[in-house]
């Protein structure tokens, strides 16, 4: 623990493949204490596992090395510590690569790498005396045990904080949560108790806000036209105080925008119920208070929390057959009718859609993600056909050869993509979420020749966080006057994201009166109807009056999710925009003036 009253934590990456120049901008743009990078998602773990299967020295996010090459000497000079879960499924190989880079840069004596180990339970899987049943379906692990490729537990911030306490200035982990890499410096610097649920929850909320990089600084923002510039986007900074209050901002002279609405949208991203479960605590998202604190500064306060869940989450990947995609570009006139005919002829020539375990047809440029929201014929359509099956031979021999012949054998004005041609089958890695008792997850931290164990035992006995009553007046909205029909986007902002086969869609009202209206009118049944043919499961609705928001969970809406899905939008990125395009009838005085 230090005597600092506040620290600045800078995020420079929200996913594997994010802007490789972001780290340099964060380190050179102004004073920071920590640089954090989040690389891992369920799909990413599957990709890294494939890489490690081919090369035992691979399996970590190689982009991490690219960013470190730009900034590692400056970080050592300025005392900036680096934390990342870039270790993926092979954190020890990642450590070796970082140490080799430090030697190449002539700063090996300054770089002290800490590694968090223990999330990888694959070697011990058969010795664990728990069913590890699928969290959503209840199926026992035995149904896919022979096909399991990897098994990683979501760890919290404690082991990362331990590595910092042991003197590490670069900390590498495997499956530490997106929020954990941000909470860890707070534990280390401020010495927060592991049962100080409100402060821990503040750290979790801060981590959630910045974990996706520019998604909180104007990227992927509903009101994108209000963003002054998207050039050299400013990545987020958190200025957090010892009492748990913090400000979200960005460096000056960078692109983007930090406002209550940009932060609110990110808070709703990939959210479920208001009680946000993390390995460290349960953060109450319905207690968060946001306030604009100057240009590109949003103050966050009032966060309450409670004890963590009893068990930890496990993310397993397993071999789940093969899939292939085929694409043809079909031009107008009558592009849609021609594309439908080509699709019909194609599926007939490959044995029919029922010949495969899964199949999909999408008309990109018309309704690939959702039914068209405009009238008129498309100038061209990209016809996408896709299959998934346990048999690679069936895909390679029945499906793949029949696509390109349709260029000359069906309608006029059709071509194949130069970089694709004949479809090729690739392996599918399925996702299996489960729960595991903390005692079955021995966590270790290694820094140099030192090694320490870190207990992952929850502290029980604390009361659950209380939820404040909804402020008065939210249910009061004008009615009985002249009505107008407007798109929902005139009343609300939105953000959507994925968790497996479930998509969440968050709506944020543009005023308190509008919140009262959407709370009464935007029901789960209405959202289910809007996503007819897309959402095959139930729709849950949660209220967050503190954010003037509703959050909807659309179950069974992403074609299986992740690498399993055959949909163009397998991660639900477009779903909020589709909902916002809905037309609703409201009292004219409810519509905000431009």
Image (tube, rainbow, N blue to C red):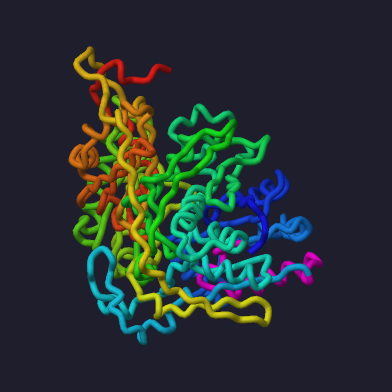
Q: For the point 39% across and 45% down, which residue is it?
A: 287
Q: Quadrant of residue 268?
A: top left
Above or below — where is 455 with respect to 378?
Answer: below
Left or right: residue 399 versus residue 304 is: left
Q: Position of residue 508 (x, y in %)?
A: 37, 35
Q: Quadrant of residue 29?
A: top right
Left or right: residue 170 versus residue 259 is: right
Above or below — where is 28 with respect to 387?
Answer: above
Q: Residue furthest right?
A: 106
Q: Point out the image quarter for the N terminus.
A: bottom right
The answer to whether residue 88 is magenta is yes
Q: For the point 35% across and 70% down, which residue is it?
A: 311
Along the viewing direction, whichever of 282 and 583 lies nearer the viewer? 282
Residue 544 appearing in the image: yes
Q: Position of residue 213 (x, y in %)?
A: 54, 48
Q: For the point 36% across and 25% down, which residue is it?
A: 490
Above or below — where is 409 with respect to 157?
Answer: above
Q: Residue furthest top?
A: 482
Residue 381 appearing in the image: no
Q: Point out the image quarter for the C terminus.
A: top left
The answer to whether residue 11 is magenta is no
Above or below — where is 143 with respect to 160?
Answer: below
Along the viewing direction, whichever of 456 and 337 lies nearer the viewer? 456
Residue range highlighted in magenta: 83-109
Along the viewing direction, whichever of 541 and 215 lies nearer the viewer? 541
Left or right: residue 408 versus residue 55 is: left
Q: Position of residue 87 (x, y in %)?
A: 56, 68
Q: For the point 27% across and 32% down, which residue is it?
A: 518
Q: Position of residue 468 (x, y in %)?
A: 34, 44
């Amino acid at each position: 623990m230090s005597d600092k009253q506040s620290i600045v934590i800078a995020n420079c990456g929200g996913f594997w493949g994010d802007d490789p120049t972001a780290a340099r901008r964060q380190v050179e743009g102004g004073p920071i204490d920590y640089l954090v990078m989040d690389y891992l998602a369920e799909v990413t773990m599957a990709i890294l596992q494939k890489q490690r299967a081919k090369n035992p020295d691979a399996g970590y996010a190689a982009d991490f090395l690219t960013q470190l090459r730009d900034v590692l000497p400056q970080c050592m000079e300025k005392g900036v510590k680096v934390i990342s879960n870039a270790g993926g499924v092979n954190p020890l190989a990642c450590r070796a690569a970082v140490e080799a880079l430090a030697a190449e840069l002539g700063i090996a004596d300054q770089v002290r790498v800490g590694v968090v180990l223990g999330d990888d339970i694959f070697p011990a899987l058969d010795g664990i005396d728990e069913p590890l049943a699928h969290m959503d379906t209840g199926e026992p692990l035995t149904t896919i045990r022979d096909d399991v490729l990897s098994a990683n537990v979501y760890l919290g911030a404690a082991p990362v904080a331990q590595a910092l306490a042991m003197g590490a200035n670069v900390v590498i982990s495997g499956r530490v949560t997106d929020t954990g890499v941000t909470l860890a410096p707070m534990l280390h610097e401020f010495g927060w108790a592991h049962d100080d649920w409100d402060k821990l929850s503040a750290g979790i909320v801060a981590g959630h806000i910045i974990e996706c990089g520019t998604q909180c600084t104007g990227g992927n923002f509903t009101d994108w036209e209000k963003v002054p510039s998207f050039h050299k986007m400013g990545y987020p900074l958190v200025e957090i105080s010892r009492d748990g209050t913090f400000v979200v901002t960005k460096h000056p002279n960078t692109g983007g925008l930090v406002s209550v609405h940009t932060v609110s949208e990110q808070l709703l991203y990939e959210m479920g119920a208001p009680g946000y479960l993390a390995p460290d605590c349960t953060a109450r998202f319905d207690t968060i208070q946001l306030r604009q604190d100057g240009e590109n500064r949003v103050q966050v306060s009032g966060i309450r929390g409670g004890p963590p869940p009893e068990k930890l989450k496990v993310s397993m990947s397993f071999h789940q057959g093969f899939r292939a995609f085929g694409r043809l570009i079909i031009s107008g006139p009558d592009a849609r009718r021609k594309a439908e005919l080509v699709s019909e002829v194609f599926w007939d020539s490959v044995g029919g859609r029922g010949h495969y375990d899964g199949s999909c047809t999408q008309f990109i440029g018309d309704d690939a993600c959702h039914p068209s929201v405009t009238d008129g014929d498309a100038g061209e359509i990209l016809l996408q056909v896709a299959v998934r099956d346990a048999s690679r031979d069936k895909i390679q021999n029945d499906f793949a050869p029949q696509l390109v012949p349709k260029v000359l054998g069906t309608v006029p004005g059709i071509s194949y993509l130069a970089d694709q041609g004949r479809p090729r089958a690739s392996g599918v890695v399925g996702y299996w979420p489960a729960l595991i008792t903390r005692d079955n997850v021995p966590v270790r931290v290694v820094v140099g020749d030192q090694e320490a164990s870190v207990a992952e035992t929850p502290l029980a006995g604390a009361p659950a966080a209380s939820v404040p009553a909804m402020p008065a007046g939210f249910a009061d909205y004008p009615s009985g006057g002249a009505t107008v029909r407007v798109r929902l986007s005139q009343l609300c902002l939105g953000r959507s994201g994925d968790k497996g086969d479930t998509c969440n869609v968050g709506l944020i009202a543009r005023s308190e009166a509008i919140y009262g209206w959407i709370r009464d009118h935007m029901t789960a049944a209405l959202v289910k109807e809007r996503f007819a043919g897309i959402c095959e499961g139930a729709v849950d609705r949660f209220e967050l009056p503190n954010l003037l928001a509703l959050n909807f969970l659309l179950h069974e809406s992403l074609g299986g999710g992740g690498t399993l899905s055959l949909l163009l939008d397998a991660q639900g990125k477009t779903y909020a925009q589709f909902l916002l395009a809905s037309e609703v009838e409201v009292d004219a005085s409810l519509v905000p003036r431009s």
